[in-house]
Amino acid sequence: MNQPKGAIVVLLLILFFSSECFAQDAPETEEDIPFYKRQIELHHDNDFLHFTDWYYTTGSFINYRILLNGLEEERDRRQLLIGISQEYYTPSNITETNYRLFDRPYAGYSAITTALSYTNERRLLDFTFQMGVTGKISGAEGFQSWFHSSNESANPEWIGQIEDAVHMNLYATYTRDWELIDDKFGVHFAWNPRVALGTKDIFLENGTNFYFGKRQGLRNTMAYHQIGEIRPEFFFVVKFAYRYVIYDALLEGFFREDSSIYTVDPVEHFFSYGMEGYFRKKRMEYKVGYNYASARAPETFLHGWITLSIARNF
C-alpha cells in the first residue's frame, strides 16, 4: 500500500530538482567545461520506505572510478572501476525460527568488484569481475543483528542461512544508446543486454531504458557513470529488464558440495523495473530511485526498494 506514495515522493524530487537544473546555462566554451579523471561513489539500497525488511533488504556499495584515457581523438574511452559491497537477503518473516517455513533462505554477500568499460559515441562495453563470499564470513548477519539491536527493532534470526563459500563471477554488458529527441528536455533510448557466468550467478538479461530530460551523450553522461568532461545534467529514467535465471547461489547455495540446511530453486523468469532521477552539478552527482523486482523464489512476492547515490568527481 506504500508503493504509490513512494512513486509520488520520487516524482516530487524530480520536479524540485528540475527547476534548479534547467536554470543552469551550459558553459559557452570548451575551456569552461571541467575535466575530472576520478570519482568516488557511495551507493545504498534499502526497502525502508515500504516499512519492510525482507528479500533484498539492504545493499551498500563504495565505488572508485578512474578514467584511463579520454582524449577526444581516441575512439574509445577506457574507464576502470574498483568497488566493495555488502548485500542482505532475508525471508519475509524475520522472527520465524523454523527455517522450513521460510519463503527463501537468509543470505549475506560481500564482494570486491573490478570492471573495465569501453565507450564511444554510440555504444558501451562493460566487463566486470567479482569475487565475493557468502555465509557468516560475509559479515551480513553480524552487522544487521547489531544494527537492529541498537535501535530496538525486530532482530532477524539468521537461521539456516546460505553457508560460507567463496564465489567468482564474470559479467558482460553491451549498451547501445539512441538520442530520439535533441532538445533542452531530450529523450534517449537504450538497449542493454547482459550475461553472467560464475559460481554466484548464471543468467541472461535483456534491458531497456528511456531517459527524459537534460542528458549528455553516451560518452559523457552520469547515466553510465562516465567521467571526464562534466556538464550539468538533470534527467530521469524509466527502466525495465527481463532475466532468464539459470543459477542463483544466494538461493541454491554453492553449486557443488553445499552444506546449507535450507535452499530453494530460483524462479527462471525474473523481471525488474523502476524509475530513477539523476542530477549532476559541478563535481557532485546525485541519484534517487524507486525499484521493483518480481519474485526470485516460488514462495516470494514482488518487492520494492529505494536507491540513493552520491558521487564526487576529482
Image (spheres, rainbow, N blue to C red):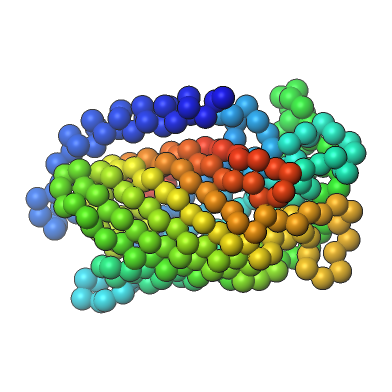
Note whether 34 is above or below 197 in the view shown.
above
Quarter occupied by the N terminus: top right
Extreme-left residue of the structure: 28
Place of residue 131 in the rendered image (x, y in percent of width and height, measured from the top left) = 65, 66
Q: What residue is rendered at 38% in x and 65% in y? A: 175
**Location of residue 275 in the rendering, given as x and y in whole percent from the top left corner:** 42, 41
Taking the image as shown, residue 139 lies to the left or right of residue 242, namely: right
Please state if 261 lies on the left or on the right of 57 as rendered. Answer: right
Q: Position of residue 62 (x, y in %)?
A: 54, 51
Residue situated furthest bottom in the rendering: 74
Residue at the spot 10% in from the left edge and 55% down from the top edge: 29
312 vs 109, nearest the viewer: 109
Name the residue nearer the viewer: 253 or 60.
253
Name the residue: 33% across, 33% down: 14
Instruction: Name the residue rendered at 19%, 52% in the picture.
Output: 181
- In the image, 114: left or right of 39? right
Q: How many marks?
A: 0
> Is residue 262 found left or right of 74 in the rendered image?
right
Question: Does residue 190 appear anywhere in the picture?
Answer: yes
The quadrant where residue 31 appears: bottom left
Residue 128: in sight, yes or no? no
Question: Residue 129: where, in percent of width, then height?
Answer: 57, 69
Between 82 and 180, which is closer to the camera in this rendering? Answer: 180
